[in-house]
Image (cartoon, helix red, strand yellow):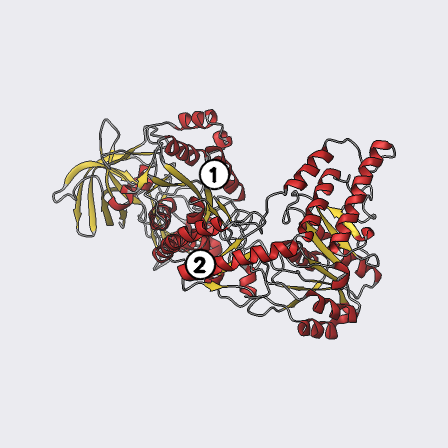
Amino acid sequence: MAYLDHAATTPVLDEALEAYVAAAREVGNASSLHASGRCARRRVEESRERVAAALGARPSEVIFTGGGTESDNLAVKGIFWARRDADPRRRRVVSSAIEHHAVLDAVDWLERHEDAEVGWLPVDEVGRLHPDALRAELAEHGDQVALITAMWANNEVGTVQRIADLAAVAVEYGVPFHTDAIQAVGQVPVDFAASGVSALTVTGHKLGGPVGVGALVLARDVAAVPLLHGGGQERDVRSGTLDAAGIVAFAVAVETAVKGQQEYAARVAALRDDLVQRVRQAVPEVVYNGDPDDRLPGNAHFSFPGCEGDALLLLLDAQGIYCSTGSACSAGVAQPSHVLLAMGADDDRARSSLRFSLGHNSTSADVDALIAALPGAVERARRAAQRTPR
Amino acid sequence: MRVLAAMSGGVDSAVAAARAVQAGHDVTGVHLALARNPQTYRTGARGCCTLEDSRDARRAADVLGIPFYVWDMADRFHADVVDDFVAEYAAGRTPNPCLRCNEKIKFAAVLDRAVALGFDAVVTGHHARLGPDGLLRRSVDEAKDQSYVLAVLTREQLDRSMFPLGDSTKAQVRQEAAERGLAVADKPDSHDICFIADGDTRGFLAQRLGESPGDVVDATTGAVVGQHAGAYAYTIGQRRGLHLDRPAADGRPRYVLSITPKTNTVTVGPAEALEVSTVSANRPVWTGGPRPEQPIECEVQLRAHGVVVPAVVTVDGDRLHADLRRPVRGVAAGQAIVAYRPDPAGDIVLGSATITD
C-alpha cells in the first residue's frame, strides 16, 4: 500500500495518540468547579499555551473548535456579522476562488442569505494571489469590506501564498484578514503575530492530531458573533463542552509538527521532488500544476492530458495506491477542480488532475510503488477516455 | 474475472453484486449518476437528486467489502435517453427509456469504459437469465422478468454481461438481501421513469415541448370530436383522459388509434380498430441463434409486460416483419417487438427490433 493522500488526512502521531488516551482516561469537565474539573481545565489551558506558543499567538487568542470547517465558518460568518453589526455599510467579503469549500461555501451562504456582496480576487496561472489586486479592491470598496479571507496554502495545487504581503495591505485599510492555514501549519513556517493576519484556522488531523479538533486563532481586538450558542466556554465565541483529550492531543501534534517543520520540509520536499521528476519521466506529457517552487513540501499535483482523474484514481486504488482527484459532490461524483478552473485551466485539464501528497511517514517505497503502477494506469485511462467521450 | 457491478442503490443490484463476489469474481461497484439538476450552487457542480440511492449503493458495497465509485453519466444519459424520449414522443411514437438506457448507457457507455479500464464484464440486477450457452432467457419470476428491456442487446454486449438474479424470484432476492445484512432488503421497488420524479409524464413532456393544441378526430366519421393540448401526450391504445366533446354514436368507449405529428392530429376509434395483425419494425438485433433466413415460428411480445402471441417472423436486412397468429390491441410505434422461443428452461430471446408501424 502506498498512502499518497496526506493532505486529506495524515496518520496520528504516536505521541499525540498516547496523550489522547492518557487524557481520555481521566474524568472531568473543564467547566466543573471541583478538583477533577480543575484538572481538565488545567490540561486544556496548558494545551492552549502550547498551541499559542507554536503558532506565535497569545493563549487568549486560541479558540478551540471542532475542526477546520467550524473554524472557517466561525471566522467568515462570525467576523462578517460582528463587523456588519458595528457598521451596516460593511457587508462585503473579499475572497478568492481557490479557497476550500469550508470558506467558499460559507462566503456563498453569506451572499445568498445575509445580503453580502463578494469581491473575488483573481489568481494567476500558478494559483497565486497578488497584493495589488487586493489593494485595488480595498481602494475601491475599503469602507464596505467586512473581512478578507484567503488561504495560506492551497490544499489542491499546494501553492503557498505570501500571506504577510497580503495582510499588510489589509492592515493599511484596517480590515480584518482571515487565513485558512490548515494545509500550512507544520509544512511551512507559520507565525500568527508576525504574519499580520487577524484570524487563522488550524486543524488537528492534517498535522498528526485527531480528527474533530482544531482552533481558530483570533486576535483579541477582532470580534466574532458565535455560530454555536450555549455555555460560552471559549471566550463566549464558541460553546460546547471542551474536548480535553482531543485538545491535549491536538496541542501535542501542533507542537511536534511546528518544532520539526524545517527538518520535515527538507526531507519530504526531497522525496516529493523525486516523485515529480520520476512522474515526468514516466509520463512525459504531464502538466505540473501550482507554483513549482513556492509550494507545500509534500504536494505534487498533475494533470494527465487525455485521462479522466477519476479513472486514474480507480486504477491506482486497485493497485493499493491512494491519491485524490479534486473534490466530489455530495453523491460522490468527481468534479472538475474549481482551483484549476480559477487558475485558467480548461475543463479537460481540470478533470484530468490528480494530487499526490506526502507526509511524515512517507518513504521512497511509496514513490516506487506509484511509479511502477502509473504508466499502465495512464495508458488504460487514456483508452477509456477515447472509448467513452463525454 | 474482474467485473463491474452497476449498483443503483436498490435491492436487486446489491444482491447481484453480492452473488458476483460469492462466485469468486473481483468485483468493483459503480453507481451511475444520471440526473442533471442544477440545484447546487458550486461552480461546475452537478446536483445529484438520487443522493439517497447513491448512499444506499455505497453502503451495500461497504457491506460486501468491494471498492465503490460514482460515475457521472449525466450528460450521456440526458442526450441518449432523456432527449431521445422527448423526441420520440414528439414524433408520435412511444419510447421505452429503460430499454434505451440499457442499449446506450449501461451496456454501452458504462460497459465500454469498464472494458477499457480492464474489466471483463458488467454485472447488473436485471431479472433475466443468461447462462453459459449465451442465450438470454426470461427470469423464473415472470412478473419481474426484464428480458424484454434487455432484448435490444447485441451478441457483443451479452458476452460481457452477467445477470446473476435470473434464477431467483424477487421474494428470494429480498430474503437473501436480508440474510446478507443489506439494508436495502425491504426498499420499495422503483416503478416510474427514473427521470420523471413526480411520475407526471404528460407534464414533463408539456414542459419540454410546449402546448400545441390540435384536433381529436373520430376514425369512423372523420368528425372532430375534441381538442388536445399536444399530440405527444397520447399513446396508442389510450382510453382515459381523452376529454371528448361528444360520445360515439354507438355509445362505446373510444381509444387512441393513431397520432399524426404532421397534422398534429390524434385519431380515436372503437377498440376493434386497435387490433393489429401485422407488425413492421426496424433495427433488428438477433442473438438467439443465427439470423433466420426463412420466416420462423415463434412468440412475440410487443410492449413491456404485454401479452405474448404466436407469430411468424421474417428478418430481412434492416427490417423485421411479424404476422401475428391472433390480433393484438395497442401496438405502438417506438416500442420493441421481442421474439421468443418457448423453452422449458426459460423462454429464449431470439431477437428484437423497434416497431415502426
Vertical side of B163 occupied by A292: above or below: below
Residue A230 visible, this orientation = yes
Nearest to the eye among marks 2 and 1: give it: 2
Quarter location, residue A388: bottom left
In this view of the protein, which residue sits in the foreground, A247 or A233?
Answer: A247
Q: Chain of mark 2?
A: A
Quarter location, residue B347: top left
Crowd band around label 2 with a 10 angstrom C-alpha radius: few (<14), some (14–19), many (20+)? many
Q: Quick one: SS at disc 2?
A: helix
In this view of the protein, which residue sits in the foreground, B245 or B159?
Answer: B159
Q: How many marks?
A: 2
Query: What's under tag 2, amino acid-wise?
Result: Val
- Between the residue at mark 2 and the residue at mark 1, the CA separation in whole angstroms equals 38 Å
Report whether A251 appears left or right of A330: right
Q: Position of residue B203 (x, y in %)?
A: 49, 50
Vertical side of B73 occupied by B273: above or below: above
In this view of the protein, which residue sits in the foreground, A141 or A51?
Answer: A51
> Which residue is under mark 1?
B9
Report whether B278 appears left or right of A152: left
Quadrant occupied by the C terminus of chain A: bottom left
Residue drawn at point x = 58 percent, y = 70 percent: A124
Q: Position of residue A348 (x, y in %)?
A: 45, 62
Q: Which mark is residue A279?
A: 2
Q: Quick one: SS at disc 1?
A: loop
Residue under disc 2 on the same chain as residue under disc 1: no
